[in-house]
Amino acid sequence: GTVEFLLSGDGTLSFLEVNTRLQVEHPVTEETSGVDLVIEQLRVADGLPLSFDGTPVPRGHSFEFRINAEDAGNGFLPTPGSITLFQPPSGPGVRLDTGVAEGSRVSPNFDSMIAKLISWAPTREDASAGLIDALNETRLYGVETNRDYLRQIIADAPFSSGQPWTRCLEDLVYHADTFEVLSGGTQTSVQDYPGRLGYWAVGVPPSGPMDSRALRQGNGLLGNPEGCAALEITMSGPLLRFNTDAVVAVTGAHIPITLDGQACAMNTALFVSAGSTLSLGTIAGAGVRSYLCVRGGLDVPDYLGSKSTFTLGQFGGHGGRALRAGDVLHIAPLVERSAGQRIADEALEALTDVRRMRVIYGPHAAPEYFTEAYIERFFATDWEVHFNSSRTGVRLIGPKPEWVRADGGEAGLHPSNIHDNPYAIGAVDFTGDMPVILGPDGPSLGGFVCPVTIIEADLWQLGQLKAGDRVRFTPVSVEACHAERCGGALASEGYIPDA
């Protein structure tokens, strides 16, 4: 069992209680005594003698911290959920007792402790330093934990001096480089650019921003690398409370922004003070997606080389899903605090009534699949965006196709059917008689014809199409596409548009 005492400031020991069981802190005794208490319990239960003689002599110093699934910045409320990343520490004198791993779900029905982190060293200073290193090395994501709170405790004077008292934590002011989601909006997800590359051949789409131009412009304005992870906001935005100072920018479709109730401008670097609430309203004009970029980027783990969220696959981003109330996201500590910079007006391309997208003709067109007359009509039509559109694909409403064959032969009964072939993002895919522009969360291959593919320089417009918008396609040569790609990258100064 465990006998507990209280130690007063004058060195007096006062008896507190006896627990006839192991305590959570039993690893400290094990580390300083060299005795495995659990094994000794089992030996006694089996009628065997203890494996040592006499009283073990304490050696060195040991610390133990409980890693809990709770939010130290929100009254230590439990934070149940799924663990999407768990990288335990290693090294001499470091021990981690846990029953969780990546993919484990932390239930709200039990104690919030998910691990015990123990360090041992010959001296108190070395044991404390080992604990700091172990906390810094530990990576756990998917649920909010008290790891950062523990790091601040160990650096605080009462603990570092070796003279803590029972109420010393009341004077510790916790600082977290985070913001809390009070409301998630319609669909707000973490995306980075260019997304998850290299896995298309095995069916994993790149995801990433639907409007990569807006995300890159926001990052460029803040001085971030252009691919830094940001929040993609669809239709209506989130309500966020910042627990630390930050500099942010909102780009893309125009969306109302208020900071502590005061209206703010888009395409501008905004300083957000710790404790402030940032509200993003509902997109009312042209476009459908806005992007919230944060200086330093969002601190979420990579999955297959990217931080982008793929909601259908339930991986990447924050928990593989759209944000919801109660989520806590970490950001880089703010170093450069300047704000007020703006994207030049001439660099912001207005969305027209009819969006014109340049395409490469083929690979499945006339005369093998469509009539020549229909292809001419295809390019002359202002296609309407269907309401049932998403990041997977944008459906279009327009003239019914004129096929040159009655069916797909071996590939299927409909003339749009072909043997499965690779798709490209931006390919206009005829699924039956309805064309669909394939998006960054779409399929990598399938059995439908694709008469045209949108060029890379115009793909950003795909992210700003909503129900009722009009689209017209203009064919260009492959050479023109490559020239546009080489000359259309965002400049580091001036934020020149792609096209």
Image (spheres, rainbow, N blue to C red):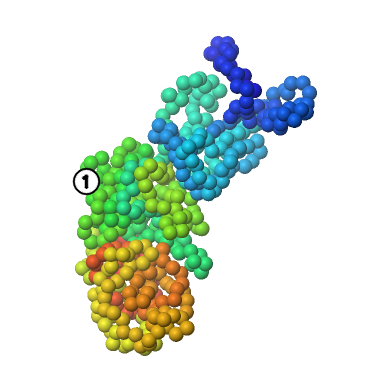
Q: Name the amino acid, label 1.
A: Ala
Q: Residue at x 28, y 45 (%)?
A: 279
The answer to whether any part of residue 194 appears in the image is: no
Q: x, y (%) of residue 489?
A: 37, 66
Residues packed near mark 1 inside 10 Å, few (<14), some (14 to 19) or many (20 plus): few
Q: Residue at x 41, y 49 (%)?
A: 298
Q: Secondary structure at mark 1?
A: strand
Judge from the rendering whether residue 233 lies leftward or rightward of residue 25; answer left or right.
left
The answer to whether any part of residue 468 appears in the image is: yes
Q: Is residue 458 above or below residue 207?
A: below
Picture quadrant where residue 380 is located: bottom left
Q: x, y (%) of residue 395?
A: 32, 69
Q: Is residue 332 above or below residue 113?
A: below
Q: x, y (%) of residue 67?
A: 52, 36
Picture quadrant where residue 498 is located: bottom left
Picture quadrant where residue 428 is located: bottom left
Q: Residue at x 47, y 61 (%)?
A: 196
Judge from the rendering whether residue 469 lies leftward or rightward of residue 369; answer left or right.
left
Residue underneath mark 1 = 263
Q: Is residue 316 above or below residue 145?
A: below
Q: x, y (%) of residue 12?
A: 58, 11
Judge from the rendering whether residue 206 lies leftward or rightward of residue 37; answer left or right.
left
Q: Nearer the viewer, residue 115 or 457?
A: 115
